[in-house]
Image (spheres, rainbow, N blue to C red):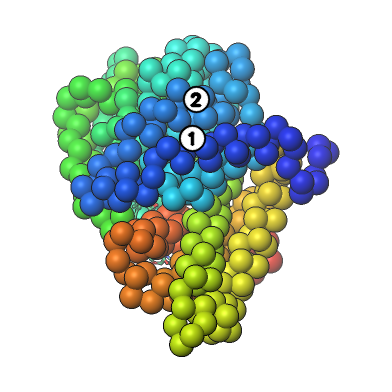
Amino acid sequence: MKDMSFTLTEEQRALKAAVYELCKQYPPEYWRELDAKREYPDAFINELTKAGYLAALIPHEYGGAGLGIVEGGLILEEINRSGGNAGACHAQMYIMGTVLRHGSDAQKNMYLPKIATGELRLQAFGVTEPNSGSDTTKLQTTAIRKGDRYIVNGQKMFISRVLQSDLMLLLARTTPVDQVKKKTDGLSVFLVDIRGLKGFEVRPLRMMMNHSTNALFFDNVEIPADSLIGQEGKGFSYILDGMNAERILVASDSLGDGRWFIEKAVAYSSQRVIFGRPIGANQGVQFPIAKAHMAIEAADLMRTKAAKLFDAGEPCGPEANMAKYLAAEAAWDAGNACIDAHGGYGYAEEYDVERKFREARLYKTAPINNNLVMAYVGEHVLGMPRSY
Ligand SMILES: Cc1cc2nc3c(=O)[nH]c(=O)nc-3n(C[C@H](O)[C@H](O)[C@H](O)COP(=O)(O)OP(=O)(O)OC[C@H]3O[C@@H](n4cnc5c(N)ncnc54)[C@H](O)[C@@H]3O)c2cc1C
């Protein structure tokens, strides 16, 4: 077993500081303006890519930094702690793992070095559909093999960053559900080059927060057969494989949000004087902030445990799921404490609290809603009866 201590190494502390420094060049006004226009943070993402942070998890042999999920999480956490939104780029870190673990050597050699330099962007992950939602195995998008191509038909819902990506990881059914033994069989994963793809339509959705999210339509879209990752029909297990990384990284987004809320609430409530004293001296203001801080610190312990187990190659499903749940809930409580501490100013755009509040809310719902995390813990950790 590798190191399971909770102190950061000197290199990890330096990484955090360097990311935070880069983020500070993108002040609140930058994020506020993009939020109002629902535009993608191109300049920020380009700089992050150039600095190599988005290639943190890509092994050295493919031009990345060869770091672990611990470091990946620290990078995302610092982006959100600085007031930014790592939702613009977090997926590249966890999608890439599917290609790394299950892609052929040809696929890895072709794509990973270009993803590492930023020449190719892999930010889109197409799973959710209008009629299946959380019940992934019921998805209806089909990919039917015809010679050296697959023909894709169907719809996807809430797929983020498609317009900012060159490549998309797509989950589709290659064998009808009534022809497989288990409903998890017959699903396949494709790494699709979506540039100029015929029959592929992207309809942007205006969401509660700036998240570059879209509805997708596939109308007899032809993709080369060598877009298939691994074996046909085994895609669901490949996606599941990547989920622990996804949970840990999204927990890190939430931890960054929570820390931002707490820092902001402490600063504001310590200087705002009402009834002749700082409002932060009142227990009604102070205690929810202190409580949120404790919850964030506790969630951080679980995130760190999950990340260290992941990097050591140990099973970490329970820890990764619990970290995602605990961090999303803690960030939400911190957001509420922060908005309460700010009174009316918490609702004013120029204070950024309302923007971060909207952004932090997402992680209670996506990429998996917290009810399903509880169902996982009930069933798989505690051995209780299955609810779905
Ligand atoms: C901004 C945004 C970005 C997203 N980006 C992506 C993306 O890039 N790629 C992608 O594939 N998806 C993406 N999603 C989709 C997201 O993963 C789904 O919204 C989420 O998985 C839930 O699916 P659903 O919305 O269809 O809800 P449903 O599955 O319809 O569930 C609705 C609610 O019912 C409850 N529920 C359902 N079943 C149960 C049960 N058995 N027990 C208890 N409660 C239950 C849940 O609490 C849930 O919140 C995104 C969503 C949003 C909002």
Residue visible at 49% across and 15% down in the picture: 113
Label 1 element class: helix
Looking at the rendering, which quadrant does residue 14 occupy? top right
Q: What residue sits right under mark 2 in the picture?
A: 51
Task: Determine if residue 53 is in view.
Answer: yes
Secondary structure under badge 2? loop
Viewer-nearest of discs 1 and 2: 1
User: Badges 1 and 2: C-beta atoms under 8 Å apart?
Assistant: yes
Residue type marked 1: Leu
Give residue 136's position: percent from left, percent from top.
41, 50
Identified by mark 2, the residue type is: Ala
Horizontal side of 236 relative to 37 (left or right) equals right
Residue drawn at x 45%, y 30% is 48
The residue identified by callout 1 is 22
- Closer-to-camera residue (60/337): 337
Compare residues 89 and 172 and report the one nearer the observer.
Answer: 89
Give the mark, 1 or 2, whose residue is nearer the N terminus: 1
**Taking 213 as reference, is 270 left or right?**
right
Numbered mark located on residue 220 in the image:
none
- Percent from the top left, x then y, of residue 40? 29, 39
**Residue 133 located left or right of residue 61:** left
266 over 176 or under it: above or below = below
Q: Label 2 neighbourhood size at 10 Å, few (<14), some (14-19), many (20+)?
A: some
Q: Quadrant of the N terminus?
A: top right
Quadrant position of residue 167? top left
| Residue drawn at (32%, 48%) of the image | 29
Q: Nearer the viewer, residue 139 or 100?
A: 100
- Outermost residue toward the front in this view: 276
Q: Nearer the viewer, residue 328 or 111?
A: 328
Near mark 1 (Cα within 10 A), the count class, few <14, some 14-19 or many ≥20, is some
Vertical placement of residue 64 versus 154, above or below: above
Q: Position of residue 329 (x, y in %)?
A: 52, 66
